Amino acid sequence: MLRGVCGGICAVLLLIAGAQARAASSIRTVYIVPTSHYDFGFVEPPEAVRERAARHISEVIRVAQADPDFRWTIESVWQVNEWLKRAKAPTSVLPKDEARIAALINLIKSGRLALSAVWGSMHTDFMGVEELNRLCYDYVKLKRAYGITTELAVMDDVPGHPMSLPSVLSASGVRYLLVGANLGIGLGGTSLAPGRVPFYWEGPDGARVLTWVSQTARGGYTEALTDYYLDPFTRDPYTGKTPYEMFNPHGAAKAPLQIMEEGVSALLKRYAEAGYPYDAVLVMYAHDFLEPSNVANLERAVRLWNGARKSPRLKIATPPEFFRYIESKYGARLPTYRGEWSGLWSEAKTHSPQLSALARAAHDWTPAAETLWSAVAMTRPVPHPVGNFSILYDLMFTYDEHSGAGNTGWPKLNSFAALQEQNRQYVAYLTRARAELHSLFEDGLRLLSAPMRAERRAESWHLLVYNPLSWARTDLVEAAPPEEGKRIVAIYDEAERRAVAFDIDERGRALFIAHDVPSVGYKIFRIEVAPGAPVPTLKSETTEDTLESQHYRVRVRADGTIQSIFSLAQRRELVDGASELPFNYLLRTEGDEPSMIALPLAPQVRVERGAVIKRAIIERPRSAFPRTVITLYDDLDRLDLRNEIDASRLPFVANGKTWHDSYFFVFPFALDASSLVIRPEGQRGFLRLPDDYLPGARRDGVTSQHVIALSDKRGALALAHRQSFHFVFHGYVRTARASSEQAFPAIFTGKWPLERATLFAKAFRYGTQSDTEDVGVANIETVEPGLGHRYLFDYSLASFAQFDPVASARFGWELNVPLRAVYIPAVPEEAKRSLFGVDQSNVLILAIKPSSTNDLSGMVTSTPLAPQANRTFILRLQEIAGRRTRVRVSLPVGLNAARVLSLDEDRVIQASVQTNPLTVELGPYEIVTVEMAIARP
């Protein structure tokens, strides 16, 4: 009896509170936007998800045709791609079921279906520079093929994105960005939501998109179901319960309208308390793999609410309907914000460190190979292999989608067999990418070196050293002997006609410095060989702990960590000797607690010296951290550091709090914390932290492209990184045991300004068990089947008098895109040649490719067609230092015409540009896309 009275009183109080909230709110209309969220590899292996997505689009069409009031947003272009692959008529050999395709296209053109222009919901901060530039390319293919248009981008689940994203979207014709940010782990998002959305989000180059952020701890994109109960009928796909039942397990049963009253009151209260000033609000109606047939439940709920004359009015819509309404009514009042707010979910990719290393390599080497083949296609009657590159970008997009990584699975969600198959598929994707790139470079470089002069000596071989980057550089070359049973005895620079000093390492490879290799070009070296096994030339000393070049002096501790790195040019110690942990210490965290890595035997240190390199090798016998190599050069102003992990010796995860441990390399730098500035490299130049954070953004760490620079009032340094990419700042990782079990994790208690200039380079997550839905807890040997247990992590360190964006960017690119060497049959006519170049150091050539408007494709014919030469190419330039610049570009061919296009190659920005020489204007941090019509002989 008492319980019933209390329940009645509570219900009345809720109704009163709801009425008060509605009266206080400015909101008169709630735009509810239905969509479905798709993950790659979350509940099924990626290939199974592709099939599921294709079936999903068919169901969207079916429901839309049956319900004229149906509204829907297709979250990602990849879903449409998968459907089109399967849109095949029963009698057709090609996927061209015109009637089915027309049904989808007409729905999109009518506005009843909205289409997001982006490939998928991505780990955008992890993506490569050129890969991110092509985020909307597949949409443009659909636009050209079928005449559909969209101005919308949707990014779900990932709780934040880098400030390069609005630049890319705006340059691709996108005006509106909808982000469903999942704050389920308590981190991410921006404090601009909910009170100051929508806002114009501005990129480094000044481009902007109108952005709405729906963010909640229950998923963000699920808010209409899980937070505001706008559909009290649909059941959660994971639990089989309605969301109201899930989050109110002990509450009394309520009628649907009462449930909606409670949810709408919560919505209005949340926005009112945040000071939301507008009369309409957007609410996302989505869930993982939500079926479009559930919209019938939403329509029923909306009719129930509006029929009861409740306020505010509920309206089922597409996102563009909401954005256009808000922009037309409040455009002048909408604020503009510029900043970084990556949710840092890409850290999940450290769970498969070898796969992520392969993906990062593909990010850089794919556009480099594309540029190489453009030089071939421009100068020879050989078509550009555009199909290989289309495959490569699809492989990268698939891994860089926000569920892409080898992992141990979400607890109680995956079957054991499906989880293993998922990891096998990710390995297959990226090993295929590696093989494709190797073949493309081998074939392309050999084609590029023709025509040739006849070879003159039997014991002479010729090595083509290729520089894929757009500036001349001096760098290290590693070359194995050209044949088994041969050893390298001499190396000659054919362009400069001089002998070159070299060392032979323990693997028989020659190590030498190639000086002044031209931009996007090559230099030829003659390699003399003799019969016999290679003999190492590096002289070893086991009693020393100090290594010195003309640039740096390094001292190693007896425990194998680094005691000192002294910059001779800057006359400055770079290592913070007062840090809690020493330099290059491998930190293991079990949950949030730090833990030691066992060293069964004392580390062994030896110093090796040669004509070219000097290195210290630290070996830790029987350890999971078996080897570190520190390399110095007299001809290169840098220190190289390689760490090797033997994952087969890692301790079993047994922290009782999480399903994985985390491992970091600790880099404490001797910089003044009071004047410290951290500058990670993004896809549009360097950020300046903490200044560049969007309000409320995560500040515990950052994902960096190639290099992270740190500076204080005395100088600067740059740490380039190849395989790893995620860095956590001092104070956000616990380095000593907590004083109590109830201590908050360091990720929540760290703060700016930072007390020390220490970077924790996240190397990898490590899991040993999976909690599967079918067989229970199962041990997992590896999440990267077939790749072995040897993890490599390469870093490079350099110091500067002050921060220099050009020098720092080049430093990072050079570690990640080393000189590439291949033996060729004979010497080309030119022993040194630049294919492409720019005359301004702050401008990079990102890629050169055939124009997407003239891809070699068409109708099937009964007679084979002769290969068609590519005549129109795209040049992508990027300004990296924040300076307006006029740049001249050198090419291997002449031009008939050139013009500036949009980033997605879909619109003409400037009808013509100077072609002799090609001259282009770039604004600060701008990426410019130039279409070039080449003059063929």
Image (cartoon, rainbow, N blue to C red):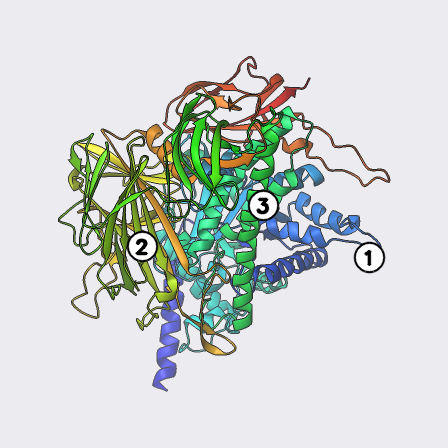
Q: Earlier in the sequence, mark 3 or mark 1?
A: 1
Inter-mark Cα distance, 2 to 1: 59 Å
Farthest front residue? 531
Residue 168 in percent (x, y) is at 49, 36
Up/down of 677 relative to 86, above or below:
above
Q: Which of marks 2 and 1 is nearer the N terminus?
A: 1
Q: Name the residue under label 3.
A: 436
Inter-mark Cα distance, 3 to 1: 34 Å
Quadrant position of residue 689: top left
Can you tell which of label 3 and label 1 is closer to the viewer? 3
Q: Mark 1 points at which residue?
A: 90
Farthest top residue? 916
Q: Mark 2 points at which residue?
A: 627
Quick one: 578 or 310, which is closer to the camera? Answer: 578
Q: What residue type is labelled 2?
A: Arg
Query: Residue drawn at (53%, 40%), measured in percent from left and top?
Result: 366
Task: Decide: few, some or many residues near mark 2? Use Cα within 10 Å; few <14, some 14-19, many ≥20.
Answer: many
Up/down of 244 relative to 464, above or below:
below
Q: Which amino acid does label 3 sit on?
A: Glu
Task: Decide: few, some or many residues near mark 3? Use Cα within 10 Å; few <14, some 14-19, many ≥20.
Answer: some
Up/down of 587 relative to 256, above or below:
above
Callout 2: SS: strand
Query: Residue drawn at (38%, 78%), measured in percent from left and top?
Result: 7
Residue 721 in percent (x, y) is at 36, 44
Q: Earlier in the sequence, mark 2 or mark 3?
A: 3
Farthest left residue? 578
Quick one: 375 or 287, which is closer to the camera? Answer: 375
Q: Are marks 2 and 1 in contact (CB under 8 Å)?
A: no
